[in-house]
């Protein structure tokens, strides 16, 4: 038994915010009220049945009664989503999954490291910390300038990077993170959160381990149901934990040191 | 208004729609917006003697109008089911079928022996056809000799209805059906998933870790209807049709082919409440065609 809601959510608006990257606003007061940072919704992209599975997306922001989803239109489901306009409705379920650990000691500075679309689930976390009057450090990396969709933040320290040097620091977001920690970690206490490609998250985990910074990761997996029925989204954990956890139910947020791929 | 109740051997179900094993958890894993009372029955995930971790990821891949899965019978084990889940699930006002699986004949027997101690179970569905377990689960479903021994042994252990769930991955589904019925199976359910593979073009390797998985979803419906049609002509026990059902028309097709009831599986992943949503439409169709109950159309396509 769960507190998951099924909702026919009206589309409030949708716009392309970077190359092939869309921001979708869905009016869903009950899910918006229940959703915690790090949780996700599962969208049925086509009522006729193709594709078969819903598509899972972390909630990137909540604006009163509206859920904001940021995604890239790369496959059949996301292209269908990109065609939604104000007045359409989306069949969604949520909130799903466990959410980030957000109760931090007052003196801690949260650092949020996102690669590409992986930055999206960190935005709601940033909002949560800013509402607590903290000033988080945000690291947003992308391949190139045109894929950057989060460029300004007055209430956080934002460090942009691009692999090709077209915006911000020239290089991987992990290199920018290393420089930041070498300059700040002696004086500040940190807790880290990250989402992005797994090779990037593996590097983030190594850096955080070296600096003894606790780290939570938001994990993405293909899911047939998103609610624990299909057992398809298994991820391998380290002993002595049970060998496989379900990303949809046990996650999508995991302690980095619980997962096998970060070793 | 048609009376949606159906008779499955000694069991009376309030409607012909059950959940398929492995798509609805243990009967207490669904969201609150789904009400168990609205189902004809629920079939649990396969239970084995001991808990099973299941197969390594990746376990699933989406395909055209379907999906492949290779979960590997991941389950909490029969004892945890009895202690932690059954007390809640048995209270639900619906028919409860427990699906059992094993690697050996002895394991199947042990699972049923433990369940026989418990009240509130209306019948057993025997998974002889899970294609994702190396140790031999499949063997029982594809060998007449093994099927006869297994169902015969389980028959001796219980008076509750036994439903044998047949594999489509055989030369003659009728032969396997007769074998199960002769050994004492009260009913049959079919089909389980079809063996399939998908290959990742980038990695140039199979997508799922075990190479082969079970294909399910709307893509397999014609195969399920065909096999139900064949088995209905070959045996004289109630049949539960399974495979690719997503609409009321699909349910009616299976009934016309010879099924007395159906199980809905893969579409529960999209919407776990889909089964009960089809009921009004089935009822309306029966009314419009002048039939009084689903039982009136079972096997009509054979006449």
Image (cartoon, coloured by chain):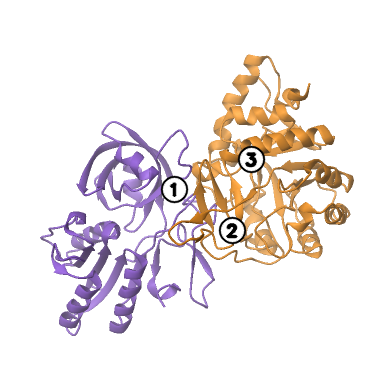
Q: Is residue A90 above or below residue A175?
A: above
Q: Colour of chain A?
A: purple
How many neighbours does mark 1 have within 10 angstroms: few (below 14), some (14-19), or many (20 or more)? Answer: many
Q: Which mark is residue A218?
A: none
Residue B17 locus on image (x, y percent): 64, 36
Q: Chain under label 1?
A: A
Q: Position of residue A83 (x, y in %)?
A: 30, 36
Task: Work out how far the residue at label 1 is from the one at label 2, CA to CA, in angstroms.
Answer: 24 Å
- Screen quadrant of the N terminus of chain B: top right
Q: Could you tell me which residue is drawn at 43 percent across and 59 percent down? A: B202
Q: Which disc number belongs to residue B71?
A: 2
Labels 3 and 2 in the same subunit = yes
Does residue B177 show up? yes
| Label ID, residue B243 | 3
Q: Chain of mark 3?
A: B
Q: What residue sits right under mark 1 in the picture?
A: A4
Provide the chain ID for the residue under circle 2. B
Q: Are marks 1 and 2 on the same chain?
A: no
Residue A58 picture location, percent across and down: 34, 54
Q: CA distance from mark 3 to mark 2?
A: 18 Å
Q: Is residue B97 above or below residue A238?
A: above
Colour assignment, chain B: orange
**Residue B220 location, x and y as percent?**
61, 40
Is B246 displayed left or right of A95 in the figure? right
For mark 3, does the 10 Å Cα neighbourhood hold few (<14), some (14 to 19), or many (20 or more) residues?
Answer: many
């Amino acid at each position: 038994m769960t507190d998951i809601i099924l909702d026919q959510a009206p589309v409030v608006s949708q716009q392309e915010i970077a190359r092939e990257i869309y921001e979708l606003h869905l009016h869903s007061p009950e899910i918006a009220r229940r959703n915690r940072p790090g949780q996700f919704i599962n969208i049925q992209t086509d009522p006729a049945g193709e594709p078969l599975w819903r598509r899972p997306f972390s909630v990137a922001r909540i604006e009163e009664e509206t859920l904001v989803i940021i995604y890239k239109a790369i496959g059949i489901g996301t292209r269908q989503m990109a065609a939604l306009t104000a007045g359409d409705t989306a069949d969604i379920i949520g909130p799903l999954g466990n959410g980030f650990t957000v109760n931090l000691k007052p003196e801690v500075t949260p650092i949020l490291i996102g690669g590409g679309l992986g930055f999206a689930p960190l935005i709601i976390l940033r909002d949560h910390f800013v509402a607590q009057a903290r000033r988080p450090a945000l690291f947003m990396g992308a391949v190139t300038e045109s894929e950057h969709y989060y460029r300004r933040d007055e209430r956080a320290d934002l460090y942009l990077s691009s692999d090709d040097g077209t915006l911000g620091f020239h290089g991987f977001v992990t290199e920018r993170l290393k420089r930041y920690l070498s300059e700040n970690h002696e004086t500040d206490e940190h807790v880290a959160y990250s989402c992005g490609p797994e090779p990037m998250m593996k590097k983030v985990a190594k850096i955080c381990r070296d600096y003894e910074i606790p780290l939570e990761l938001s994990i993405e997996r293909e899911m047939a149901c998103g609610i624990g029925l299909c057992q398809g989204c298994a991820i391998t954990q380290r002993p002595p934990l049970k060998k496989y956890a379900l990303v949809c139910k046990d996650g999508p947020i995991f302690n980095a040191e619980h997962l096998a791929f970060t070793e | 208004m048609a009376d949606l109740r159906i008779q499955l051997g000694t069991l009376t179900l309030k409607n012909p729609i059950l959940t398929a094993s492995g798509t609805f958890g243990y009967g207490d894993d669904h969201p609150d917006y789904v009400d168990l009372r609205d189902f004809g029955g629920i079939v649990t995930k396969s239970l084995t003697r001991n808990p099973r971790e299941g197969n390594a990821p990746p376990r699933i891949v989406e395909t055209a109008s379907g999906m492949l899965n290779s979960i590997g019978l991941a389950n909490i084990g029969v004892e945890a089911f009895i202690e932690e889940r059954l007390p809640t699930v048995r209270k639900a006002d619906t028919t409860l079928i427990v699906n059992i699986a094993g690697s050996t004949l002895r394991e199947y027997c042990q699972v049923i022996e433990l369940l026989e101690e418990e009240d509130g179970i209306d019948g057993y569905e025997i998974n002889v056809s899970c294609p994702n377990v190396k140790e031999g689960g499949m063997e029982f479903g594809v060998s007449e000799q093994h099927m006869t021994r297994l169902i015969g042994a389980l028959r001796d252990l219980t008076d509750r209805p036994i439903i044998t769930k047949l594999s489509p991955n055989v030369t003659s589904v009728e032969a396997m059906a007769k074998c199960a019925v002769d050994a004492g199976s009260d009913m049959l359910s079919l089909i389980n998933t079809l063996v399939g593979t998908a290959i990742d073009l980038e990695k140039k390797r199979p997508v799922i870790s075990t190479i082969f998985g079970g294909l399910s979803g709307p893509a397999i419906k014609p195969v399920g209807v065909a096999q139900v049609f064949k088995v209905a002509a070959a045996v004289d026990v109630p049949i539960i049709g399974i495979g690719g059902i997503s609409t009321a028309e699909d349910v009616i097709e299976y009934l016309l082919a010879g099924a007395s009831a159906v199980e809905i599986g893969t579409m529960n992943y999209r919407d776990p409440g889909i089964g009960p949503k089809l009921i009004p439409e089935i009822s309306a169709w029966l009314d419009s065609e002048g039939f009084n109950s689903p039982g009136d159309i079972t096997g009509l396509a054979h006449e």
